[in-house]
Amino acid sequence: MTEAAPAPGELELLAEGRLGQVYAYGDGRVLKLDRPDWNGVASFEADVLGRLAAAGLPVPRAHGTATVDGRTGVVMDRVDGRSLLWKLRESTPEEAAALAEPFGALHLEINGAVVDGLPELVPRLRGELGLAVADSGLQAELTELLAELDDGTRGVCHWDFHPDNVLAGPEGWVVIDWITVGSGPPVADVARTLVIWGRSTWEPAATFMRALRRAELELRNIESARVDAWTRVVAGARLAEGFTGAEADWLLEVARGAVTLSP
């Protein structure tokens, strides 16, 4: 169901990101409004949230969509709590390391769910490699590696799973921002998290990431070499997102295998 909503200037802005802005929207709800360049993705996210909630995953409940000045937004339950990024910033290195295990366990819970109707991740990766990796030899190598790594497992892959997308609500942790979700091999989603935060050198984030990698390997009983192989593929595909400068150079080095995200 889509409804009309007040103009953005009449709503309280709570948070904003690259794709949307989140406003207070009545009692106990928020409106996540698409930015103009991304208008229309709210309908997709509303559908995805319904599917994930039905699978028992910890996500905000969606209540349809609303339009504001031609922009679409998804109406969701409001989660009163800060993201884990805030908790991480206030943590000691020891506390950050301890946070990694429950974070990894939540990631495993998400990846263990099988939900119909989600976009297929592997074809997306294949297309991004073809688009973004200019070196034809490296492109062919990564495409072949993707085929070898794909074991046919299809779990929910958030594809943007990091502490700022997990809210510590009064009833537990809640995962937000599902625009990039896909159905694919769970280890690929582990690699994606490692790549997204792979260049973090500030403490205690660096300690958290080292501990998270160890926790993910232990919880899933997977070999380090398999994660390293996936990080190469994921880093190459991430170049399709238009990074330049030092970030692009680093992603290319990871894709080549010259840089490994070791624990």
Image (cartoon, rainbow, N blue to C red):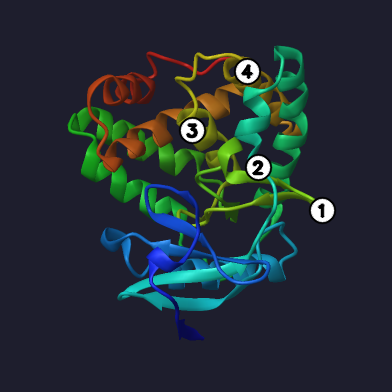
Residues at discs 3 and 1 in contact (Cβ within 8 Å): no
- Which amino acid type corresponds to the residue marked 3 in the rendered image? Trp
* Residue drawn at 65 percent across, 49 percent down: 111
Q: Is residue 118 above or below residue 67?
A: above
Q: Is residue 205 visible?
A: yes
Sequence-wise, the earlier of marks 2 and 4 is 2
Determine which residue is flagged by label 3: 230
- Nearer to us: label 2 or label 1: 2
| Picture coordinates of residue 131, whole percent (x, y) | 22, 44
Distance between the Cα atoms at labels 3 and 4?
17 Å
Q: Which mark is residue 82?
A: 2
Helix, strand or loop at label 4? It is helix
Determine which residue is flagged by label 1: 171
Residues at discs 2 and 1 in contact (Cβ within 8 Å): no
In the depicted view, which residue is nearer to us: 52 or 37? 37
Distance between the Cα atoms at labels 4 and 1?
28 Å
- Which amino acid type corresponds to the residue marked 4 in the rendered image? Arg
Sequence-wise, the earlier of marks 2 and 3 is 2
Graded by Cα atoms within 10 Å as few (under 14), some (14 to 19) or many (20 or more), the crowding at tag 2 reads some
- Nearer to us: label 4 or label 1: 1
In the depicted view, which residue is nearer to us: 215 or 120? 215
- Which amino acid type corresponds to the residue marked 2 in the rendered image? Arg
Q: Is residue 24 above or below residue 227?
A: below
Q: Is residue 162 visible?
A: no
| Res 40 → quadrant | bottom left
